[in-house]
Image: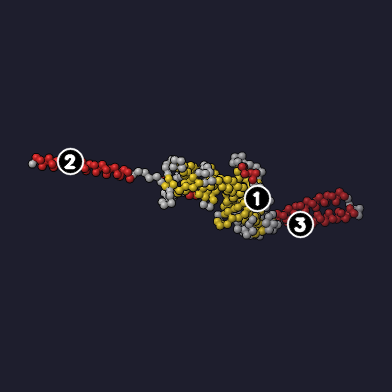
Amino acid sequence: MRHNHLSIIALCTLIAVASGCSSDKAKETPGASHQEEIPAIEAVEVGLQTVDATGEYTATVEAFKTNNISSSSPNRIKRILVDVGARVAKGQKLVELDATGTDQLKVRLDNAQREYDRAVQLLKIGAGTQQSVDQLKTELDAQTKQYANLMENTYLVSPISGVVTARNYDPGDMTGSLPILTVEQIQPVKVMINISEAEYAKVKKGMKVNVNLDVYPDETFTGTVYLVHPSIDASTRTFTAEITIDNPQDRVIPGMFARVSILFGTTEHVVVPDRAVVKQTGSGKRFVYVYNPADSTVSYLPVELGQRLTDSYEITSGLEPGSLVVITGQTRLRDGSKARLFNKNENPSPTPNDSI
């Protein structure tokens, strides 16, 4: 019995030892499977490219000229001959004012003319004096001017060709501080933009620019630099340029939002695929990952974007030509982390959703 008891104890000891060994091996195996996998990436070498050097500006469309039709003195409006939206010509009568007193002035003018003519005839036959003729001529000139002023204020005419865009009174109203009508010339229209003083020498009268309007998203209009203001705003370090846009069909009207693009020449900058540029969450900043073959790591580089060029971006600062920029697999990357270039038989890590 004692021999059998010792055998059982020995057997149990062996089983326990074996179980312990198996348990240790089981603990070691999962550890090996949790080794961190180096992310696979795709990278391309970037270099300098010649790109257009353009300036982008926003502005509001304005009438080329604006004229307010007003009476020089308070008067009652007899008739308004046009309404808002009417196209008018230069010199066209727009408003008729009350002509009270016109008849009396006309009678006095006619009398002054007859008295002057009579004095001239008497002088010719030796029955009058030059002094009398000169005196009557002065009176005639005064009456003529007074009558002309009254007649001028009786009919108000348009000094420009354009469109009536505002009306503030009705017939029978007394004129006040507001203009009776507003006439705007909209053939052409214009936009006024503020440009950095660094570009002053590049902007010339007559140069062509592109103008885009939100209301016509699929069209680009051609504008012409009409005037370059000869002064720099000391507070903003900018100058003003006026751009005219031909408008034969009146499709462009004052108040529209415009984007103006001016070509200043060409320049050389690094250009990267758009997939390489990633937006930093919460800040709006842009960056790229650059692969370093020497130690198989990536570097996080903030960059300044220039123009969007179809499927790529101009980089104005932050990236050197010849760099290997990561275009796929940025999701698992951090500044200084290890990475490897993927081979053709595998797929790289996905590109982050916030890339642009």
Near mark 1 (Cα within 10 A), the count class, few <14, some 14-19 or many ≥20, is: some
For this view, does 248 lie left or right of residue 44? Answer: right
Name the residue tied to disc 1. 207
Q: In the displayed image of the protein, which residue is found farthest to the right?
A: 126
- The colour style of the image is secondary structure
Judge whether 82 appears above or below 241 on screen. below
- Image quadrant in which you'd find residue 231: top right
Q: Residue at x 41, y 49 (%)?
A: 349
Upstream in the sequence, badge 3 or badge 2? Answer: 2
Upstream in the sequence, badge 3 or badge 1? Answer: 3
Three-letter residue code for mark 2: Thr
- Image quadrant in which you'd find residue 101: bottom right
- Label 2 sits on a secondary structure element that is helix
Name the residue tied to disc 2. 13
Name the residue tied to disc 3. 106
Question: Considering depth in this image, is 246 or 283 the residue closer to the camera?
Answer: 283
For this view, does 57 lie left or right of residue 337? Answer: right
Upstream in the sequence, badge 1 or badge 2? Answer: 2
In space, the residues marked 3 and 1 are separated at their CA atoms by: 55 Å
Q: Residue at x 78, y 55 (%)?
A: 109
- Image location (x, y in percent) of residue 301: 48, 42
Q: Residue at x 91, y 55 (%)?
A: 125
In space, the residues marked 3 and 2 are separated at their CA atoms by: 141 Å
Near mark 3 (Cα within 10 A), the count class, few <14, some 14-19 or many ≥20, is: some
Q: Residue at x 75, y 52 (%)?
A: 146
Q: Give the numbered dot on residue 327.
A: none
